[in-house]
Image: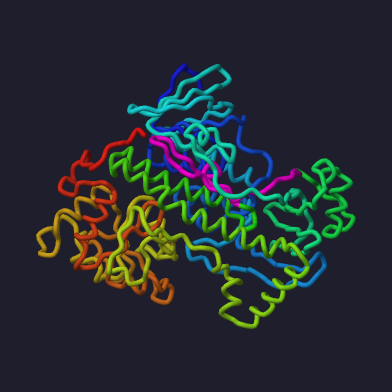
Amino acid sequence: MTQSTSLAAAVLVVGAGPTGLTLANVLGRQGIDTILIDRKASTVAEPRAVSIDDESLRTMQAIGLVEAVMRDVVPGYGVHYLTRPGGRCFAKVEPTASEYGYPRRNAFRQPLFEAALREGLARHASVRVLFGHTLEALSQDEDGAHAVVQGPGGPLRIDAAYVVGTDGGRSFVRQSIGATLAGSSFNARWLVVDTENDDDPFWQTRAYCDPSRPVVDVPGPNRTRRFEFLLKPGETDEEVLRPERLAELLRPFRGNRPAEVVRKTVYTFHARVADRWRAGRVFLAGDAAHLTPPYAGQGMNSGVRDAHNLGWKLAAVLRNRIAPAALDSYETERRDHAWALIRLALNLGVVMAPRSRLSAWACAAFFRATALVPPVRDYFLQMKFKPKPRFHDGLLVASAADTAGLVGTMLPQPKVRTADGTELPLDEITGDGFAHVAIGAAAMTGTGVDTDADADTADTAGGGRALWRRLETRRVVLLPRLDDQALRLAARHGYVPVALAPEATPKTLRALAGKVVVVRPDRYVAGVFGHDDAEALAAALGRRLGIDMARAGAAPALVATARAA
C-alpha cells in the first residue's frame, strides 16, 4: 500500500502472532476498521506452539477458518507417561470426548497456523496488515489512542479508538501502560528441538518422567516431531546446541538414524500474569497479559481465548450495540481462567519433571493405583482435570431457570440436522453473534422472544424483544424430530428448527427442556430463561451490557460512554 504520514482505524492491534491474527479476524468478520502491525517481516517461519485445543478450534470455526486450519492438524492425540526411555508406561491421557465439537488435544505447526490466519484476513476489506512496522510510542486522551510507528517508509502516526497489545512476553504495549508481570520465573531450562521428515509412526505424546533427564516427545503434522529436554545445572546453551551433543541426546529415541533439525533453542519457562490488562483505551492479550509454562500446551490457546472474548466485545461497542463500560468484563472473565491453566501446567510439571527418584516413583505408583479405579482412571484418561472455562462474573446473568448450571460456561456443540437433512455443528446454525437456543417446542412460546406477529399475546412484553433485536439475536430451536407440525410451529415463532436426537443431546441441555439459552458471540452462555423470567433476565442482561432498556430499540441508548483512562 502507499503509505501516508497518518492513518486512522477503530482498532490498532500490535503484534501479529496467533492472538493478534485471531483478534484481527474476529474484528474483520464484523466489518470493524482494523490495523494490525508487527515488527517482523512476516508471520513466523519456525515452529513454536505445537498444541491446539478444542476451544481454539471452535474459535477458528467462528471466524470461518476451521477447515483451512484443520488441513494441517493431527486431531485427537494424547499423552503417555513413561518412567524413562525404553521404560514402563505408568499412565495415559487419551481423551475421546468432543463436547465443543472438536477433540480436546490436537497437534499443529504454528507457521502453518499463522499463515492460514493471515490468509484469512484477505477476506476482510476493513483490515489492513502492516508487517515490518515497529511501535515506538503510545499515548491516549479523550479522543482516542495515538501510536507512533516506524516503518519502511519512515515514521507513521496511527490514531485509533482502541489499541490491543498482542506483542508477546516482552510487550512494549504492556510497558507503555505501566503494567507489570506478577508470578514466577523458574531456574529450569529446557532444550527444544524440532525435526521434520520424522519416521516414528507413534502419534501420541510421550513424556519420559525420568528424574535424571525429563524428556517430552511430541508428534506433529506432516511427519514433524518436537523433543524437549530438561537441562541440568552447569549445562550451557552453547554446549547443548552443538550438533554432536544434539545427536547424543536424541540417540535414546532415534538410535543412530540422523534427525533433520529445523529449530533448536533453549528457554526458561514462566508462570506470570499482568497486574492489569487494561488502561483506558489500551488492552493486553495473549503473552502480553499472561505467560504459561508449556506442560499443558495452553499458552497459545489462552491467547486465542483472549482474542475471541475481547474481539466480540470491541466489535459490539464500536457498532454501538453495547456500552464501552462493558469492556471491563474482559479481564474479569479471562483472568481467573488464565491463572487456572497456569496452575494446571505447574501441576503437570510435577509429574513430567520429577525432582528426585522418590518423587518419580511416588507419581508412577499413584497413577498405577488410579488405573484400578474406573472413575479416577477416566478422570485422567479423558482429560477431565483440565479446568473448564467458567465465568462467575461478567456479561452474564444467573437465574433460577438455569437448573443445569450452564450460565458462564461454554455451550456444548453437538451435530444437528437441518430441515433438508444436512448434518452440521450447532454453531453453523446459531452463527457468530448472539443467539437464543430453545430446548424443545415448549420453549418457543411465551418466553418473551416471540415475533412481532405474536406481540399481542399476554405473556410477551416489548422490552425483551427490543434488546434481542438490538443484539441481532438469531433464534434456533432443538427438536427431537422435524415433522410438519414442528416446522410450522418454528416458522410461526421465528425460530430456525434443527433436529437433535434425545440420546445425542448433552445432558446439560436435556436438563433445560422448555427453557431458552442465551448464547454470546464467543459461545459462552449469558443466561437461561423460561416462561416466567424472560423479561427479568433481559432487563438484567441489558444492565450488564450497559443498555438503557427503556430505550433499547434506539441505537444510541447506552448507559455509559467510553472511558479515556
Identify which residue is drawn at 80% across, 51% down. Answer: 233
Q: Is residue 275 part of the magenta span, yes or no? A: yes
Q: Position of residue 123 (x, y in %)?
A: 46, 38
Depth order, front residue of 445/328: 328
Magenta segment's dominant SS is: strand
Q: Is residue 485 something one can see in this rendering?
A: no
Identify which residue is drawn at 64% across, 57% down. Answer: 295
The coloring applied to the image is: rainbow
Q: Position of residue 407 (x, y in %)?
A: 36, 63
Q: Is residue 203 left or right of residue 96?
A: right
155 lies above or below 54: above
Depth order, front residue of 55/223: 55
Q: Is residue 149 left or right of residue 238?
A: left
Q: How many marks?
A: 0
431 lies above or below 134: below
Residue lying at the far bottom in this picture: please name it: 372
**Which region is colored magenta?**
263-292
**Which part of the image, by quadrant, shows the C terminus?**
top left
Q: Is residue 67 something one can see in this rendering?
A: yes
* Quarter where residue 412 is shown: bottom left
Q: Position of residue 459 (x, y in %)?
A: 13, 64
* Quarter where residue 106 is shown: bottom right
Identify which residue is drawn at 24% across, 56% down. Answer: 540
* Quarter where residue 441 is shown: bottom left
Q: Position of residue 36 (x, y in %)?
A: 49, 33
Q: Is residue 461 part of the magenta span, yes or no? A: no
